[in-house]
Amino acid sequence: MRVHLVAVQAALSEGPYRSAESFAAWTVRLGRAALAEVPSDGAPVLLAFPEAIAMPLLFTLGGGGPVDGSATLLEAAGRSLRGSWTAVLAAAWRYRSPGPAAALLARAPVVYDAYVDAFREVARVTGATVVGGSALLPDVELEAARGRHVTSRRVYNVSYTFAPSGVLLGRSRKVHLTPGLEGRIGLARGRVEDLPVMRTPCGPVGVAVCLDGWYDGVVATLDAHGAEVLVQPSANEASWTRPWPPDPSVEEGEAWLGRGLRALLQERVNLRYGVNPMLVGDVFGFSPRGRSSILANAALVRHPWAEGREGVAALAPSAEQEAIVVVTAELSDRRPNHGSVPSARG
């Protein structure tokens, strides 16, 4: 089965986070730009967005106020708390969750709506399966009598995947939290045994959020459950050319391509491709860097790779600018029967 795999390297700026509407308009623009880079042959398309793409919404929606004048994440968080302290106190009481997690819970309904609505629209507009990067959210459910409501007090770094119709296919909670910020703001860890492998029009897809894609246990679990494509949404706040802290003899980018997901994909039984969309740009002093890539298990995929490195199928040209990375892939013919989906190309 032929599919088109696309890593969307999104560049942060203040404008998209001024409102839910501006966030949706930005993500749809990125989706349309990505689709324009894909051959018009009718094959299914997988669009993957970066980790933390929705995080700045925590500081701007639900009383958070404008982003202008907030030079750092800490300053933005302070302005956000001053603008909605009563809601934060109410969340702390309701969920018995003091500290930073209460602020995340207070914002959960509006951030959930903005995040989910935006990527549902991307899927509908493009006709693609969409991995919507990630957001910091508790478990949120829709139910006929109660509507949209928070069902747990634990907040996760979680990635949502949508079918071309816009319906939710699955949620993948980050298992291994990045040391530092993610622990300090009270995030909970997902469980590796809960990571879904989703049967999509693009084949069986699993999601490992950023650091999870460096862990053999996560990759092995998704492989064992039959995933053929592993999406690794990432936001790496480090220079792509700095010495890599665990081994300063190699640069950050060399470690990502040589020792991360590319290395873990090799010799797997089912996994054929890895899609690693990375967040770049600057907002609130948050300045992630990285070159998005599409990677391959060389034991299952035979291809003359453009980069001349075994297992690297395509690589973004810059670690700082918006980019679209596309590979046309061949997977086994295990497509689920989702019915016909109208083409977004007209």
Image (cartoon, helix red, strand yellow):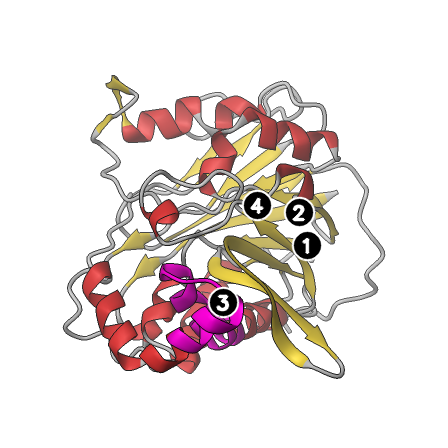
Residue drawn at the location 48% of the way across and 56% of the way down: 134
The mark nearer the N terminus, 3 or 4, is 3
Q: Which residue is disc 3 drawn over? A: 32
Residue drawn at the location 42% of the way across and 66% of the way down: 102
Residue drawn at the location 48% of the way across and 70% of the way down: 108
Is 289 drawn above or below residue 322 in the view shown? Answer: above
| Amino acid type, mark 2 | Val
Q: Which residue is disc 4 drawn over? A: 190
The mark nearer the N terminus, 4 or 1, is 1
* Local crowd size for mark 4, using a 10 Å CA cut-off: few (<14), some (14–19), many (≥20): some
Is residue 210 visible from the viewing direction of this image? yes
Q: Which mark is residue 44?
A: 1
Q: CA distance from mark 1 to mark 2?
A: 5 Å
Residue 323: image location, x then y, percent: 37, 52
| Amino acid type, mark 4 | Gly
Is 14 drawn above or below residue 145 in the view shown? Answer: above
Task: Compare residues 84 and 338 and report the one nearer the observer.
Answer: 84
Q: Secondary structure at mark 4?
A: loop
Q: CA distance from mark 3 to mark 2?
A: 17 Å
Disc 3 versus disc 4: nearer the observer: 4
Q: CA distance from mark 4 to mark 1?
A: 29 Å
Marks 4 & 1, CB-CB < 8 Å contact: no
Q: Quadrant where the C terminus lies?
A: bottom right
Q: Which residue is disc 2 drawn over? A: 3
| Magenta segment main secondary structure | helix
Residue 181: image location, x then y, percent: 32, 47
Residue stretch in magenta: 89-114
